[in-house]
Image (spheres, grey):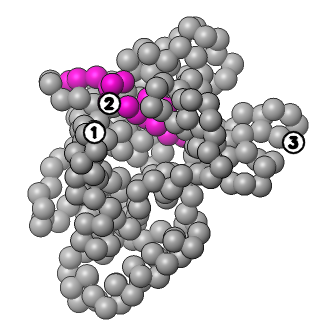
C-alpha cells in the first residue's frame, strides 16, 4: 500500500503518507493516524465503535474477517479505507451539483466507493488493491473521455459508477437525508449505514455521537466508565 499511496495516489491527489506496521498489543506512536485491521465490527465487544484515535485523529477500519467470510479480498478493502481517509479524513467533504438556484445534490467525497469491487482493482507486487477515482470524477463539466477519471482508466465520465460501485448522495431539497445510488441506478430509500464504525456509517452519524479511542491503560483503569459510554453510543446509533 505504501507504493500505491506514494506512486499512484500522491500524483493524483497531492497527498502522501508514511505507513508503518504496529503489531497487536503494541501502542502506535502518538499523534499518528490509524488504519486498524479488525476481524469484524464486534471484535473486542466495542472496538468497532471507535471513530477517532486517543489523540482525536482520523482512524480507518478494515473488517478483514468479514471480507474473508464473504469471499472478498481484504487488501482491497484496506487500500480502499486508507485512500479514502487520506482524501477526506474528517468524513465531512461533499461536492455540490446544482440543478437550479435552490436545488441540488451533494455527493460524498469518497474516492473508492464508485469502483470498489475486487474485479476493478489492480495489483502491485502481487497484492490486489482498490481502484480509486481522480478529482476529475467530481467535476461535472468534464466531457466523456476527455481526461482520466480513475487509476485503472475504466471510468469514462464524471459520476460514472462501475459494476458493484455506489456513492452517497444528499438531496438538498428532499428532506430525506443521505441515500445511496448504485451502479444499477437505483437509489435506496435510506443511506445504508454499513458496518459499525465504517466511513459510510460515520458520515450519517452526528459528531457528538463519535467515540474517541482510549489507550489500553485508560480502558483498564476506567473500564466501567468506558463500557457505560460505549453502551450509550450503541443505543444512540441504533435509534438514529
Mark 1 in CB contact with mark 3 (< 8 angstroms)? no
Distance of mark 1 from mark 3, alpha carbons? 42 Å
Q: What stretch is highlighted in magenta?
A: 107-124
Does residue 172 appear to the left or right of 87 in the view shown?
right
Residue in view at x 38 percent, y 68 percent: 49
Does residue 225 appear to the left or right of 160 in the view shown?
left
* 36 and 118: which is toward the camera: 118
As for residue 82 lying within the magenta part, the answer is: no
Q: Is residue 30 above or below residue 1?
A: below
Mark 1 in CB contact with mark 2 (< 8 angstroms)? yes
**Could you say which quadrant of the image residue 223 lies in?**
bottom left
Residue 72 is marked as 1
- Residue matched to label 3: 102
As for residue 112 lying within the magenta part, the answer is: yes
Q: Please tell me how crowded label 3 is: few (under 14), some (14-19), or many (20+) other residues with Cα within 10 Å.
A: few
User: Of marks 1 and 2, which one's residue comes earlier in the chain?
Assistant: 1
Does residue 163 appear to the left or right of 126 in the view shown?
right
Amino acid at each position: 500500500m505504501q507504493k500505491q499511496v506514494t506512486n499512484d495516489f500522491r500524483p493524483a491527489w497531492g497527498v502522501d503518507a508514511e505507513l508503518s506496521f504496529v503489531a497487536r498489543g503494541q501502542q502506535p506512536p502518538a499523534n499518528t493516524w490509524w488504519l486498524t485491521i479488525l476481524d469484524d465490527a464486534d471484535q473486542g465487544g466495542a472496538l468497532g465503535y471507535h471513530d477517532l484515535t486517543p489523540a482525536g485523529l482520523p482512524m480507518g477500519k478494515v473488517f478483514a474477517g468479514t471480507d474473508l467470510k464473504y469471499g472478498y479480498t481484504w487488501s482491497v478493502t484496506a487500500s480502499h479505507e486508507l485512500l479514502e481517509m487520506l482524501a477526506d479524513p474528517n468524513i465531512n467533504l461533499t461536492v455540490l451539483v446544482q440543478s437550479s438556484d435552490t436545488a441540488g445534490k451533494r455527493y460524498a467525497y469518497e474516492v473508492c466507493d464508485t469502483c470498489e469491487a475486487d474485479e476493478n482493482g489492480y495489483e502491485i507486487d502481487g497484492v490486489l488493491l482498490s481502484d480509486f477515482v481522480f478529482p476529475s470524477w467530481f467535476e461535472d463539466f468534464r466531457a466523456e473521455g476527455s481526461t482520466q477519471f480513475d487509476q485503472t482508466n475504466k471510468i469514462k465520465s464524471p459520476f460514472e459508477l462501475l459494476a458493484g460501485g455506489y456513492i452517497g448522495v444528499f438531496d438538498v431539497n428532499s428532506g430525506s437525508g443521505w441515500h445511496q445510488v448504485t451502479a444499477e441506478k437505483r437509489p435506496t430509500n435510506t443511506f445504508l449505514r454499513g458496518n459499525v464504525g465504517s466511513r459510510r456509517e460515520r458520515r450519517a452519524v452526528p459528531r457528538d455521537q463519535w467515540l474517541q479511542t482510549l489507550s489500553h491503560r485508560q480502558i483498564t483503569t476506567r473500564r466501567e466508565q468506558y463500557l457505560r459510554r460505549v453502551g450509550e453510543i450503541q443505543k444512540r446509533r441504533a435509534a438514529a
